[in-house]
């Protein structure tokens, strides 16, 4: 693991960690696209049967897809939790004024898509899918933004990152509140007791990572047998790991630094491969005929940018916050469209919301189509804005 020199200032460490995160997400986003294409091609080729069987291989009492979605994705949520922790302590969420714009925009970007979906699906068997269009895929969104190169102001990259992280937190809360099975109280109490013990370790400045890792595994096991989705253990573990904003060698920094590349280049690509193995020929017609799919499309493509712009504009007009340096409303419009790229979190929530295979596959296709439309629209808008206004120094 690369060591950070002790004479580096916290601000320099922050810039380095943010750049490392952004760069890993950028490359990870490109890899996600490739994995998705490969998975869909294989799922609709002569190798279809063999490819589908790969993900049903039994390991222990669970199949491979289940281990990826419930096991490896807990690691993804751990990284999200660590990112959120960093933003709260020393990042864009470290002060009320910095926080209000991305938080307001993220809230709008969650509420409006959910309302659009519910307007189309309320009272039906698919109303439980309201959380699907609420999510933003940070890796894909940053990957698309990175294609615009150095013309993008750093403040706009930071805004997108903060927006997506708050969005992820919202998705985690939605999962915890609405996508849980029957609660097994005893296992939940054990999991929360482990979390409480880890918090005590934190308070007493116990910086050895081994107890936290062992405790995290324990939390994952008991949460997975409690009815609460096991991925939440990753977030709980993240907030129990000590963070020292004056020390780039704090345990939180070390594990976050270590996880960037495994998550970007192993966990998320495996998730994409395992969950985009869709037989298009048998499900494409449902994308335009099922109200659940239409709700997802409308929520991500229309609801996301509308909610982000409306709530962001309201927060600025009420003088609760202001636009970041070198960022204009046309840029926010482009970023809002990029936020309609749901993918990872949207597919993850789909698996929790639906049990019917047909509904799951049509929802996945709707997510892919909506993400393609949103990503293309956001990219073209931003490219046009930057081309017409140079490097946007004067806006």
Image (tube, grey):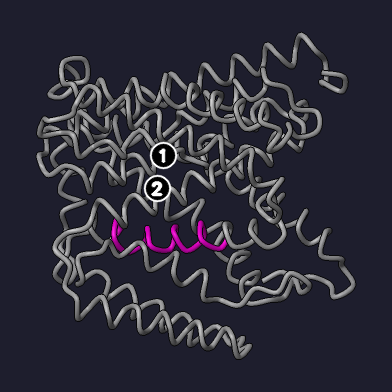
* 245 left or right, relative to 277: right
Total numbered circles:
2
Residue 13 appears in which quarter of the rendering? bottom right
Q: Position of residue 139 (x, y in %)?
A: 52, 42
Where 237 falls versus 154 (above or below)? below
Question: Is disc 2 placed on a helix, strand or loop?
Answer: helix
Indicate whether residue 69 is drawn in magenta.
yes
Q: CA distance from mark 1 to mark 2?
A: 6 Å
In this rendered view, identify the residue nearer to me: 341 or 181: 181
Q: Residue at x 25, y 29 (%)?
A: 118
* 281 left or right, relative to 69: left
Instruction: Pick the quarter of the image with the C terminus.
Output: top right
Q: Position of residue 43 (x, y in %)?
A: 22, 34
Determine which of the numbered discs, if any, sits on residue 135 in the image: 1
Q: Residue at x 42, y 49 (%)?
A: 268
Task: Please provide the residue range marked out in magenta.
Answer: 68-82
Q: Position of residue 152 (x, y in %)?
A: 74, 29
Q: Give the mark nearest the N terminus, 1 or 2.
A: 1
* 64 left or right, relative to 21: left
Determine which of the numbered discs, if any, sits on residue 182 in the image: none
Question: Is disc 1 placed on a helix, strand or loop?
Answer: loop
Determine which of the numbered discs, if any, sits on residue 171 in the image: 2
Q: Position of residue 338 (x, y in %)?
A: 53, 27
Mark 2: few, some, or many residues within 10 Å (few <14, many ≥20)?
many
């Amino acid at each position: 693991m690369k060591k950070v020199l002790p004479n580096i200032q916290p601000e320099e460490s922050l810039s380095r960690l943010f750049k490392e995160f952004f760069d890993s997400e950028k490359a990870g986003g490109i890899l996600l696209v490739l994995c998705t294409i490969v998975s869909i091609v294989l799922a609709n080729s002569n190798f279809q049967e063999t490819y589908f069987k790969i993900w049903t291989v039994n390991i222990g009492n669970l199949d491979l897809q289940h281990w990826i979605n419930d096991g490896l994705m807990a690691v993804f949520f751990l990284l999200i939790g660590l990112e959120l922790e960093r933003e709260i302590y020393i990042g864009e969420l470290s002060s009320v004024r910095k926080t209000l714009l991305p938080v307001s925009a993220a809230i709008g970007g969650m509420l409006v898509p959910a309302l659009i979906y519910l307007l189309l699906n309320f009272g039906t068997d698919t109303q439980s899918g309201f959380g699907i269009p609420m999510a933003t895929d940070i890796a894909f969104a940053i990957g698309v933004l990175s294609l615009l190169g150095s013309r993008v102001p750093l403040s706009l990259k930071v805004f997108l990152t903060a927006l997506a992280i708050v969005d992820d937190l919202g998705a985690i809360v939605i999962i915890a509140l609405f996508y849980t099975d029957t609660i097994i109280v005893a296992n939940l109490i054990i999991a929360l007791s482990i979390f409480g013990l880890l918090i005590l370790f934190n308070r007493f400045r116990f910086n050895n990572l081994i107890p936290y890792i062992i405790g995290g595994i324990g939390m994952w096991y008991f949460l997975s047998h409690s009815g609460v989705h096991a991925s939440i253990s990753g977030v709980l573990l993240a907030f129990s790991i000590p963070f020292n904003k004056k020390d780039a060698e704090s345990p939180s920094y070390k594990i976050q630094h270590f996880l960037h590349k495994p998550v970007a280049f192993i966990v998320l690509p495996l998730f994409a491969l395992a969950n985009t193995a869709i037989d298009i020929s048998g499900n494409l017609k449902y994308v335009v005929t099922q109200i659940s799919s239409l709700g997802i499309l409308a929520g991500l493509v229309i609801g996301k940018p509308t909610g982000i712009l409306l709530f962001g504009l309201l927060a600025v007009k009420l003088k609760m916050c202001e636009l970041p340096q070198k960022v204009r409303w046309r840029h926010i419009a482009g970023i809002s469209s990029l936020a309609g790229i749901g993918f990872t979190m949207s597919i993850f929530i789909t698996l929790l919301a639906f049990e019917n295979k047909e509904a799951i596959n049509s929802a996945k296709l709707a997510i892919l189509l909506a993400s393609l439309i949103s990503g293309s629209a956001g990219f073209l808008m931003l490219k046009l804005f930057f081309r017409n206004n140079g490097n946007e120094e004067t806006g």
